[in-house]
Amino acid sequence: MDTKNVEIYEKLAKKYDLATNIVSFGIEKIWRKIFVKKVKKYIKNGVLLDVASATGDMAKEMDFDKMYLLDPSEQMNKIAQEKLKNKNAIFIQNYAETFECPQKVDLITAFMAVRNFDNLEEGIKNLDKCLKVDGYFAIVELTKSDSILFKLSMFYMTKVVPLIGGIITGEFEAYKKFPKMIKNITDEEILQYFNNYEIIEKQRLFPPMATLIIMRKNG
Ligand SMILES: C[S@@+](CC[C@H](N)C(=O)[O-])C[C@H]1O[C@@H](n2cnc3c(N)ncnc32)[C@H](O)[C@@H]1O
């Protein structure tokens, strides 16, 4: 497993929430709100698996009977544990590609998650094993488009964010690697591994840098 990107997240963990909020001008929070509202239209309880859970902000918004948070970063998990003290949350420090599913779940949330997988196909296939038939797989991911706004946003993400992020966290070296972590992934690249799913929501978010996808698993 290539652990380089996780090493970066380990370094950024303590200031991750603050830095993300500042460099995204709060847009990430708005996207999360839209995502949570849409997901709750279909499913509100049962067992949740949040992949690439980072500091636990997704699980914080959810009131599921049981929540598994999956992330390979020890530091991210520590912060999430503190945030979710009062929730029924179980932490799995592992990769999407290699974790062992503890039980079948009703919903998998992957918010800004899948582009971080070292191997997208293996990650999605391993997660799929953990989802019940008729369960939901919900994704928000940064995805490519041809629009000028997308190109401008990418310029901001790859040239400006590393600088501001470095100033906020003091981790200039870690942020230097940030542009490489913003992989130019397309909707199709993600969706090619979801053959056994029905897409029930697909929406380009604004600014046009990310796509929201909600799918239901067929039998
Ligand atoms: C952008 S953050 C995710 C944000 C988070 N989902 C949220 O709701 O705020 C990316 C996370 O992906 C994790 N990660 C990196 N490689 C991973 C992998 N192969 N499987 C699962 N998580 C991974 C990192 O440790 C990091 O915490």
Image (tube, rainbow, N blue to C red):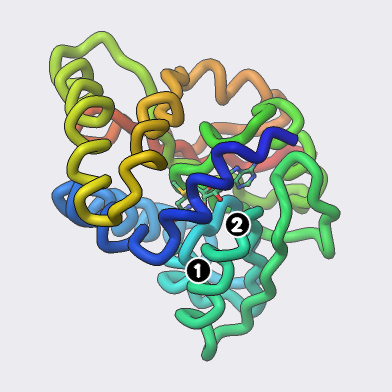
- Choose between 14 and 128: the one closer to the eye: 14
At label 2, which amino acid type do we have?
Answer: Ser
Give the quadrant of residue 112.
top left
The residue carrying pointer 2 sits among few (fewer than 14), some (14 to 19) or many (20 or more) residues within 10 Å by Cα, namely many
Does residue 124 appear in this view? no
* Type of amino acid at the residue the image marks with label 1: Ala
Q: Residue 192 appears at what percent x and percent y?
A: 63, 18
Q: Is residue 154 visible?
A: yes
- Disc 1 crowd rating (10 Å Cα; few below 14, some 14-19, many 20+) is many
Judge left or right: residue 140 versus residue 107: left
What quarter of the picture does the C terminus occupy? top right
State the mark number for residue 73. 2
The CA span between labels 2 and 1 is 16 Å
Q: Is mark 2 within 8 Å of ligand 1?
A: yes
Nearer mark to the viewer, of 2 and 1: 2
User: What label does residue 179 carry, if any?
Assistant: none
Q: Please give the name of the residue rendered at 47% of the width and 54% of the height, measured from the top-left corner.
A: 11
Secondary structure beneath dot 2 equals loop
At x 42%, y 19%, the residue is: 184
In the depicted structure, whether residue 116 falls above or below residue 48: above
Percent from the top left, x then y, of residue 16? 36, 58
What secondary structure is found at the residue carrying circle 1?
helix
Viewer-closest of 151 and 5? 5
Residue at 61%, 49% (x, y): give it.
136
> Which residue is at the front of the view, 184 or 31?
184
Measured as percent of width and height from the top left, residue 107 is found at 62, 56
Queried on whether the Cβ of the residue with tag 1 lies below 8 angstroms from ligand 1, the answer reads no
* Left or right of 134, for residue 12: left
Q: Which residue is mark 1?
A: 59
Residue 101 position, x and y percent, is 82, 56
Counting residues from the start of the chain, the first of labels 2 and 1 encountered is: 1
Residue at figure coordinates x 83%, y 63% from the top left: 103
